[in-house]
Image (cartoon, rainbow, N blue to C red):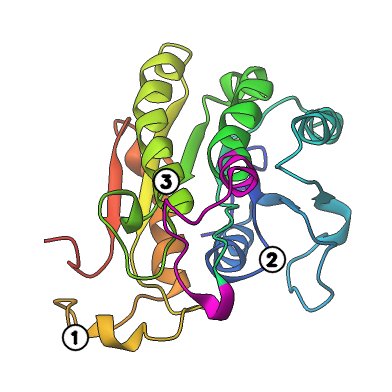
């Protein structure tokens, strides 16, 4: 439901908003009356439907810590009320080998390791720490997007991606402990095979191994993100919710 006129409008900061789960998350929150500030390495896409999108989009290279800190300063400037109700760390990169093949721990170059961890692991804590005062002011919520690949070897996800997501799951627990004392909840979601435009060739072979025998949809993920950012989950802290149709059982 849209935000009541008796309450100030809530604000979400979302990284990786231009497609897939991020795009569905923008639609879910903006439909509920939230202001959505988006961050990605791409300019604002003209086909995106939400109100004030171009004015509330920040282009940032999350692999570059200084660029990210500059984005934090700009976000603080835009938060006129000084409150941030939710931070969703969705942006991630998953490099592939030639022909889209999985990059193993043997084949991944150190530059790729550093780049992947910069975006997938370090950027979430840089953003959360940089915006802690605004999150505290709103008694806000942080949601880190991990992955089923963080807990098992995946046929498509490379080693750098998988280990960065495993590290992000561990970081979520640490943040839940540290940020919880500041009144800020921190949780994670771990999507499995989600039907987006960037599915790897061969994903259809995995569907038969999923108890629900289908892929998930971006909106099914966005709905859980929304719950974790609202009072419905007011006593949920340090959790990692698996959204994979039972693929992990």
Q: Where does the image place residue 89, in percent across and percent down from the top left?
A: 56, 44
Extreme front residue here?
106
The span picked out in magenta is 98-117
Q: Which residue is mark 2?
A: 18
Check residue 208 in the rendering and tell me which mark sits there, or answer none.
1
Q: Nearer the viewer, residue 89 or 10?
A: 89
Check residue 165 in the rendering and tell me which mark sits there, or answer none.
3
Q: How busy is the neighbourhood of tag 3: few (under 14 within 10 Å), some, or many (20 plus)?
A: many
Distance from disc 1 to disc 3, alpha carbons, whole Å, reads 24 Å
At horizontal 62% and vertical 61% (from top left) the residue drawn is 26
Q: Nearer the viewer, residue 123 or 224?
A: 123
Extreme top residue here?
181
Left or right: residue 93 compared with residue 221: right
Q: Where does the image place residue 136, in percent across and percent down from the top left?
A: 57, 19
**Which quarter of the figure has residue 73?**
top right
Q: How busy is the neighbourhood of tag 2: few (under 14 within 10 Å), some, or many (20 plus)?
A: many
| Badge 1 or badge 3: first in the primary sequence | 3
| Badge 3 or badge 2: first in the primary sequence | 2
Q: Where does the image place residue 5, in percent across and percent down from the top left?
A: 65, 46
Q: How busy is the neighbourhood of tag 1: few (under 14 within 10 Å), some, or many (20 plus)?
A: few
Secondary structure, mark 1, is loop
């Amino acid at each position: 439901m849209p935000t009541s006129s008796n309450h100030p409008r809530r604000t979400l900061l979302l990284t990786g908003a231009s497609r897939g789960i991020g795009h569905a998350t923008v639609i879910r929150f903006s439909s509920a009356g939230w202001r959505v500030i988006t961050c990605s390495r791409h300019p604002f896409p003209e086909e995106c439907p939400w109100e004030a999108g171009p004015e509330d989009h920040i282009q940032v290279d999350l692999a570059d810590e200084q660029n990210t800190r500059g984005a934090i300063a700009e976000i603080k400037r835009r938060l006129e009320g000084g409150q941030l109700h939710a931070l969703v760390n969705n942006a991630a990169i998953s490099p592939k080998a030639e022909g889209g093949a999985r990059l193993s721990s043997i084949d991944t170059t150190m530059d790729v390791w550093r780049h992947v961890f910069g975006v997938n692991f370090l950027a979430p804590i840089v953003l959360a720490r940089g915006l802690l005062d605004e999150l505290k002011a709103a008694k806000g919520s942080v949601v880190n997007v991990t992955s089923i690949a963080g807990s098992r070897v995946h046929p498509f996800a490379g080693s750098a991606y998988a280990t960065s997501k495993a590290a992000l799951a561990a970081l979520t627990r640490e943040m839940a402990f540290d940020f919880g004392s500041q009144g800020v909840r921190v949780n994670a979601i771990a999507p499995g095979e989600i039907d987006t435009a960037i599915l790897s060739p061969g994903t259809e072979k995995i569907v038969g191994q999923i108890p629900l025998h289908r892929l998930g949809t971006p909106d099914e993920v966005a709905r859980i993100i929304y719950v974790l950012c609202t009072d419905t989950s007011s006593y949920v802290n340090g959790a990692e919710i698996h959204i994979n149709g039972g693929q992990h059982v």
